[in-house]
Image (spheres, rainbow, N blue to C red):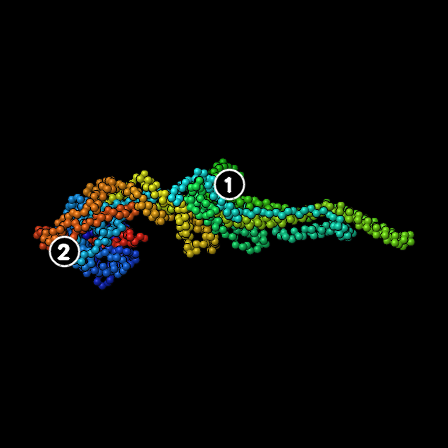
Amino acid sequence: MPLRGILHDWATLGLIGNAVVVDVDQLRTDTAEIPALLVGAASRMVCLQERLADSEIAVARLCVISAADSQSGIVDAAVARRLSEAVQTSLPYARLVKTSLAVGHSGAEFAAAIPDLIGWDALVLSPEDGLSPMHGTSELTNDPRHPQWHLHVAGNCCSILGLWRGQEDSVLDSRSAVSDGGASPVRAFTRSVAADTVEDDLRRRLLMVGERYPVPRVDTSSGAAVEDENASVTVMADALLREHSDVLPRARTTPPAPAPRPITFGDALRQFFTFMWAALKNAPHAFAEGLLRTASAATAAAVNSVVYGANSSLVVVVRGVRPDGSPASWDETEQGVEKALQDNDGHAELGAALQKPQLWRDYTAGALTLLDAGKRSSHLPPVTMGSTEAVVTTTARVAPDPADAFTLPAHIAAYLPNWKVEVADDIGAKRLHESLEKLSASNPQLAQEIGAEKHRLREWVTVNSASYVGQVGRTLGNAFRATVTELEELTQRLEQLRRAPAMTNEIEADQRRLAARFRILGGVSLLVVVALIGLALGGLLAIVFAVVLVVVSLFATVLSGALMYMKGQRSLYQFIHAQEQTASALETAERHRKEALQDLRRLIRAYRQYLDWSRALCAFVHAPLGRLQEAQEQELSIGQGLPRCVRIGVATASPDVVDEAAGRIRGELFRAGWLSDHWAAYISQAPASLGSLRYALQSDPGMLDQDANPDGAGPVLTRWSWAVAQAAAERPASATFLARAEELVAGTPGVRDKLLSLISFRDSDTGEMKVVPRAEFEGRLDGAEAQGGTFRELIFSPHARNIDARNVDLTRSQDQFNGLAHARVLVQFGPSLPRTDYRTSADVAPNHTRPPQQAGTFGESPRGWGFADTDTPSATPAVMPSADVDGF
């Protein structure tokens, strides 16, 4: 019997599960291994024991088929027991259902084909063909010129053993083997419906949420779609940045400027003699410089001696463009600001940059909450309309499509190479605009085309910056640009303050004039004192009176000198005050510059991480559930020539029917917070394109929060975000989502019946393609309606003692689904009869001629077949799924 070819074709078409076929002619006595053929989409030879040992099986079904047409086609009982022992040893905890099936044409010796096996369910397949028990039947002959009988045997075996797609178990699972050595006649009627195309259409409609998300179900009611999407995303972005305001530049504090300090008489008196001495030495300039140093020493000591000139690393930070016009990477930018910080601190070692993983968790949570109304953070609550949670349904309002990156036409890109602005890159867009302006100025012949590109860029920025992602990026970008501008202004101010003159010429001239006056005053005072002393010595003045006059003269000199000093040094003290203010301003500017560099370093790190998370987030938002693999449209290629008892069809559903079904289950499928599990699965993946880094990420997912760069090839977060973003659109559809959708299709009244309402199939006689309602296709295979009935006399002996031998004793009906694949199977059993009630050689007419037997080949064994059917346990023990490993 060419069962192998039939089963292979059916398994390849996805009509049945895999089958393990054992050709008993190939069994060897010198080895325990049993060679078998795993029949399926890719048939291959296996060892039966090894194949079964590698499987998780709850129920194993073993069927040996004996061909009653010749003695050589009968499976020996010892061979059957060997197969049974091999299966039971390989699957010690599986339940083994053992069946022997005698098949043959009308008039064959069925009694001889029934093996003597205890504990086996012995069956005899009646070679009759009909649409249903309610229709008439016709006799089937084993004619090698017509394959109908072989198809009849293969189809009935699949029906009895539960191999058709949609069958969850077998009718044999609940049937007990008789112990009287008898065998029961059996026949089966099958309607198998494949629904791959309909199922794929439904899945594709449910998965297509990239441009507009469904409104989720919140608790027991439906959510709402916000009316003003722009305002909603703005509120969420503002709430995020308000919660994490420490990522933005700090406010600068400026101490009050030193207050003007007037020259008091005490100051003048104290400094009189010092200045007098300097005047006498003709060094008033040195006196003024010393006074200036003393006054500004406290503030000047706090200011370092860095020279603020053109710094190449800061040029990269400020412009973000290399000399060749290409954009600088954020690694270069970050290294530039770190070098500037080290230079500012005298090449001191910088500490590690502070990471903010919670910021990015909240950033992504805010985007997901806008789309699915999930409650993820107390400070980022869902948008509400009244008391109802609402969502932004337009994905581009939350996260722009990453495929919409801005690129330049080739003739302009030749001047500005490697420019490709991501949808979230606000800073990159502004830098490109500046580069286009410079290019337009240097290439007037391209001015018109560059102007058009600038206009296109501005419109592109306007659209993207209105999204949640864009608003966060714009705030960070504005902070970056403001800090860069502040840094430039502070650098220029420091250079100006450093260039302030030590002393003006006017002050030096004032010092010289005041010194000359002091010398004259001193000279006059000295002459007066000498004259008074001379008069006293000459007796012209009393000594006491002379002393009094000397003291008065000296006092007058000091008093007039102090007053003269106070008036003459006013400009010097004004200059000293100005220098004190300059020193204070220099200290403040230096501190502000250092703070600006620190803020810039933090902003650059934050902005690069923002780009990384946005890259991954945007790719996810536009393909949150993965992509369904494109499948070829299913065509029905078999049907003509099949026996009447087997009908194979394909479900046909219009787009409107599929849309209606998707709408019926979408509410329960998309509930508030539905994105959370898919996002968690998305960020936990490590694409193969990461190379060896994927293994490090799998063992330590916290590397993304740490933003490490372990091998110096770039931050892990950046490399990961590029990898997942590129793989997002092609990753397989979420298995949990599809399983949930399947549950809802099965559990929502009317949905599955509507999708399977029309069936197309080929007429077994004419091959004509027909489309009929499912009820008509199934053709009266209702178990209750088909009770009773009789078998044809083809397998029974005319001398059977049991007068009820031909009567149907038990009818088992199956109406089962695997997804949308449907199988309706009706199997009828007769009573257990002794071998003597089946046709023997004595009952064969003398003029009966056996049909010619084909030579024994692997597909056509003269000694019969062994068939094993197994089930894989499902998550719910009470329900068995379709076969995982099956076989003859």
Q: Residue at x 17, y 50 (%)?
A: 809
User: Would residue 141 be visible to someone looking at this image?
Assistant: no
- Left or right, 285 with respect to 116, comes to right
**Image position, residue 625 (x, y; %):** 38, 46
Residue at which label 1 appears:
433
User: On the rendered image, what quadrant is the C terminus found in?
Assistant: bottom left
Q: Amino acid at mark 1?
A: His
Kind of residue at badge 2: Pro
| Residue 218 or residue 542, whichever sits in front | 218
Q: Horizontal and vertical percent for residue 627?
A: 36, 46
Q: In what element is the residue under mark 1? A: helix
The secondary element bearing badge 2 is classed as loop
Neighbours of disc 1 within 10 Å: few (<14), some (14-19), many (20+)? some
CA separation in Å, label 1 and label 2: 94 Å
Identify the residue at image location x=13%, y=51%.
Answer: 804
Identity of the residue furthest to the left in this view: 846
Instruction: Give the residue furthest to the top.
Output: 448
Residue 838 seen from this side: yes
Mark identifier at residue 850: none
Q: Name the residue tied to disc 2.
A: 834
Instruction: Identify the residue at horizontal 41%, vertical 40% (top origin).
Output: 224
Most foreground residue, 297 or 202 = 202
Residue furthest to the bottom in view is 30
**In this picture, residue 213 sits left or right of residue 359:** left
